[in-house]
Image (spheres, rainbow, N blue to C red):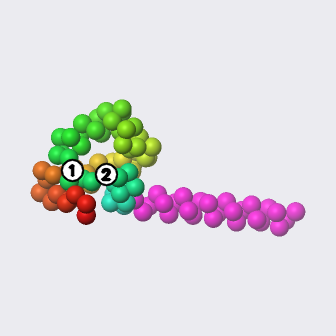
Amino acid sequence: MWTLALKRVLCLLFFMSIVSYAGTNISPQNLAKKLHLVAGKKAIIQWERIFKSKRKMKRYGIDKLSKEEQKVLKKYLLDHAADSDHPTVAGM
């Protein structure tokens, strides 16, 4: 009985460590890549329109991200949009 309780505690700690690790390591480049989004394909105003529309966010899969991930992704896309100071090159 004690070993079963110990196993449960260890499993719980393991899953908690995975969740906390994933939450602290948000990479906007990886989020964009996962959703097949290239920042340089759209202008800043286009990215802003996408993030203002629930329908458009759902179309790109952004709605499934947490609020923090959405915030980080939006900043990345705006910072590297086609008309920004540091645009990304499509396909890179």
Residue at the extreme right of the image, as rendered: 1
Asked whether 45 or 3 is in front, the reply is 45
In this figure, which residue is indicated by the disc labeled 2? 37
Indicate the secondary structure of the residue bearing disc 1: helix
Magenta stretch, residue numbers: 1-26
On the picture, is 83 further left or further right than 14?
left
Q: Residue 63 sits in which quadrant?
A: top left
On the picture, is 41 further left or further right than 22?
left
Label 1 packing within 10 angstroms: few (<14), some (14-19), many (20+): some
Q: Is residue 37 magenta?
A: no
Q: Position of residue 83 (x, y in %)?
A: 12, 50
Indicate the secondary structure of the residue bearing disc 2: loop
Asked whether 43 or 4 is in front, the reply is 43
- For badge 2, the amino acid type reads Leu
In this figure, which residue is indicated by the disc labeled 1? 41
Quadrant occupied by the N terminus: bottom right
On the picture, is 8 further left or further right than 67?
right
Q: Position of residue 54 (x, y in %)?
A: 36, 33
Quadrant occupied by the C terminus: bottom left
Q: Position of residue 12 (x, y in %)?
A: 67, 60
Q: Residue at x 83, y 67 (%)?
A: 3
Q: Position of residue 69 (x, y in %)?
A: 39, 51
Q: Residue at x 35, y 52 (%)?
A: 36
- State yes or no: discs 2 and 1 in contact (Cβ < 8 Å): yes
Q: Residue at x 76, y 65 (%)?
A: 7
* Whether residue 92 is situated above or below residue 32 in the rendered picture: below
* Whether residue 60 is situated above or below residue 9 in the rendered picture: above
